Amino acid sequence: MSACADGCQRGKCPVNPTTFPSSFKKAQADRGREETTATSAPNVHAHFVGRLQKPDFSRQTRGVDPESLRPGALVISLDFELHWGVRDHVPLDRRERARLLSARSIIPRLLDLFEEFSVHATWATVGFLFAHSRDEAHAFMPVRKPQYFEGKLDPYQEELGRDELEDPFHFAPTLIAEIAKRPGQEIGCHSFSHYYCIEEGQTADEFEADLASAVAIAADAGYTTRSYVFPRNEVNPAYLPLLERAGIRTYRGTESPSTKLPGPFAEQCRLHRRFARLLDSYADIYGSQTFGWPETSTITSIAASRYLRPHSAVLRPLRCFQLRRITQAMEQAARQGEVFHLWWHPEDFAIHCDENLCFLRSVLATFDSCRREHGMVSLSMAEIREYQFGRVVDASLTEQTQ
């Protein structure tokens, strides 16, 4: 039986293999740390803005409403966490180590797929992952640490290895450098310690200290963070001024249905909320959840539209319904000049890697079609704000929107 370009057998592929474009590039070897360490804040800013002002829209064609300079847009954000995202409820045993190693290996393949389709994305990255060593991580730890009522939420009790080579589950500077080297990939902020903004016990001062550490360790590695994703989508409106003060300009808002609104993790895990979120992935329960371009403000919410639920052997027969749900929403955004914001964790693809990549390929093929037919664009979270203010300058895009 022949295999598709991602290594998934065509006969077992979760979606129609005829939708897959041409060959999938081989994952590239680890290229080491990117040489972008900043010597000053202006250098960091110039490095970021230089990337931001040259998005690749060369594959996009005409089809945008001539009365509007805002075409439909696909935004992708990924929560890059490794073990920090689950450390309070998943032990770092042999099975979890294998999963995280698989997650690390899938990231270059994801990047190849994004590059093949000229897709931009925001990688919201936990601050600890920037550290090259335990000593560096300790050097950037905030003085004020969160005092959660639930002791298991405290990330600072986590045992760390000496460096990335010894502990690839808590450190990932080489992967971050690999992501940043690829066109259109934004390094965003996911707090320093996977900070939970709605859990009881923590305070605004502790959040601000955590945020300062996250921004500082990223800047030390050469990255200016302009976008923020609240861990576990615990968006706390009271903390938005603190984000703005730290130089953050966009954040990922939550989906609008009540079962997807922010809340403590225990509340989010209640059975009725989990079931409603699961059902909405396959059936139209809450509508397309696309939205108009965000209003201008000092800090901009880029609301989530859909979580890209990973492959499940049990739910495999429903995979085509999941693809249709995503496709219909994306096509609506393309036709109406709206935004469709898809998000997931790269770690979600660690199990059933090939099936997940095959499915993502079909999603991106839909976007490619929307780009050709309607002029839809792919933007990172930071880029959508810059585009909103007219700061993204690109000749090919200007031609498409006139």
Image (tube, rainbow, N blue to C red):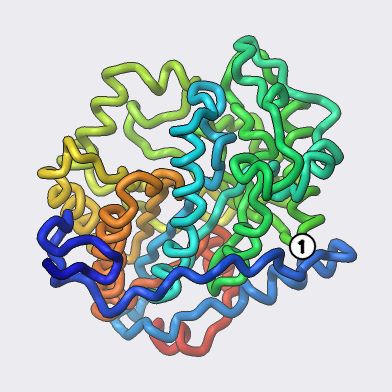
Residue 333 visible within the image: no
Across and down, in percent, residue 353 comes to: 34, 52
Q: Which residue is mark 1?
A: 222
Crowding near pointer 1: few (<14 within 10 Å), some, many (20+)? many
Residue 189 relative to residue 360: left or right: right
Q: 227 and 84: which one is in front?
A: 84
Across and down, in percent, residue 364 comes to: 31, 66
Across and down, in percent, residue 164 comes to: 68, 48
Residue 351 relative to residue 194: left or right: left
Q: Quadrant of the C terminus?
A: bottom left
Going 66% across and 21% down the picture, which residue do you hit? 154
Q: 203 and 128: which one is in front?
A: 128
Q: Quadrant of the N terminus?
A: bottom left
Q: 13 and 62: which one is in front?
A: 13
Across and down, in percent, residue 12 comes to: 14, 56
Going 30% across and 57% down the picture, which residue do you hit? 354
Q: 225 and 100: which one is in front?
A: 100
Going 60% across and 48% down the picture, which residue do you hit? 125
